[in-house]
Structure formats: C-alpha cells, structure tokens
Amino acid sequence: MKRIIVALVAALATILSGRGEIIYVNGAAFPIGSQGVDFDGDGAIECGFSSGGMICTADIPSSACYWPFYVGSGAASQLIVAGSDASVLPLATGIASAPPSGANWSAPSSGANLVIYLSSPRNGTSEWVGPLAAAGAGYLGVRFQAADGLHYGWIRVRMQQPLEFLPVVVDWAYETTPDKPILAGDKPVYFSASLAGVN
C-alpha cells in the first residue's frame, strides 16, 4: 500500500511540475486610475490605469458629463483588445500567442477604453458604460517581454461595490515560464502529502 501511495504522489508531482510556476499577487486591490501593475517586480509598469478626468458641458446645470478610464500597456508589454476597447475576459479564458476570437494583441505602449462614467446633473441620471461595465467583472490579458522571453499574465478587474466610488483592480498573476500560456484566473497549485504509519 505504501508503494502505491508513493507512486501516486510521484506521478502527481510529475504532472504538476509541467505546469510551470505562477506568481500571484492578492490583497493589493486599488481603484482604477490610481496606479499600475508591475508583474515581475523589475520596476517597469507592464500595465497602467489612468483617467481622463471628468469633462462636462458648459451649460448650468450641466446636461452631460463624461469620465473615461483607460488601461495601457508599457513599452515592453501588450494587452488583449477588441478595437479601441480592452477585452474583459471570462474566467479560464486562454491567454496565449493567439488571442481569443474577435480580439487582438495591442501594440506596445498603447491604451484602450476600459469603462466610462456618464452622468447628467440636469436630469439626475448616471450610468457606467464600456467593456468592464458590460461584464461587471473579468480579466485583462497581458503579455510582457522580460530578459528571459515573453510572459503571459492576467489582471482581474471589477466594478465598484457598495462604499466604493470607482471600479477596482483586484489581483493579478503571471506565468514565470517564458512563452507558456496562462488561463485567466489561474493561480499557483500547492501540493503536500503526509504519510504516517508502517503501511
């Protein structure tokens, strides 16, 4: 029995070792527009978030206000986009050299629309529009060039919750093995075994 368990543990370890290593950052949530993500900690922002600031019509009270929020890639990184919009991907979408159907990899150092706040103080109405508003929550696909090659990663974003004013960047991860695809939402797998007794 002990030999069978040891063989199973060895087989599982072999399977998991082929996965590569995923570096995952949790608990560093921040409002969209306030900072960026440095996946590998080298000091270069691979994915930045910005706001164009609110623009309102000159009439009083304003009939329309527009507040856009963007996501942008760094000089050595790219985003999965659909036209001028960021693609907000569902859980377990493959992030690899071939982007999902209907999407493309952006050029390095480019930006994409993520979400827009529209309001009319005159009419007392407001709404969020854009790819993140339509999805509610999801993942941004990112790839970046490091010294050892191209790495794939994801960033989870969501619309604001009660007591929050802006949408939020929740967490992110990347695959440390160059050219190895990652699934949106994929996290490190930890495995441990404990054998006790004589059998």
Image (cartoon, rainbow, N blue to C red):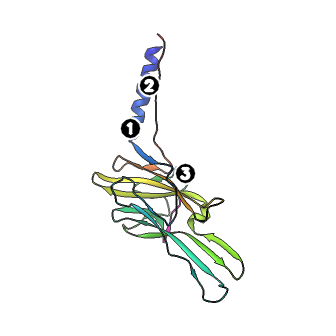
Q: Main secondary structure of the magenta part?
A: loop
Residue marked by disc 3: 91
Among numbered discs 1 and 3, the one appearing first in the sequence: 1
Q: Residue 180 at x, y = what percent?
A: 38, 48
**Residue that lies at the very extreme toward the left in this rendered image:** 147
Q: Amino acid at mark 2?
A: Val
For label 1, count other residues whose C-alpha is less than 10 Å away and answer few (under 14), some (14-19) or many (20+).
few
Q: Are marks 1 and 2 in contact (CB under 8 Å)?
A: no
- Provide the secondary structure element on which disc 3 rests: loop
Q: Residue at x 35, y 46 (%)?
A: 177
Instruction: Describe residue 57's horizontal placement relative to residue 2 as left or right.
Output: right
Kindly tell me whether residue 199 is visible in this rendering: no
Residue 18 marker: 1
Give me the C-alpha separation between circle 1 and circle 3. Answer: 22 Å
Residue marked by disc 2: 9
Q: Which residues are magenta?
A: 84-88
For label 2, count other residues whose C-alpha is less than 10 Å away and answer few (under 14), some (14-19) or many (20+).
some
**Residue that lies at the very extreme toward the front in this rendered image:** 163
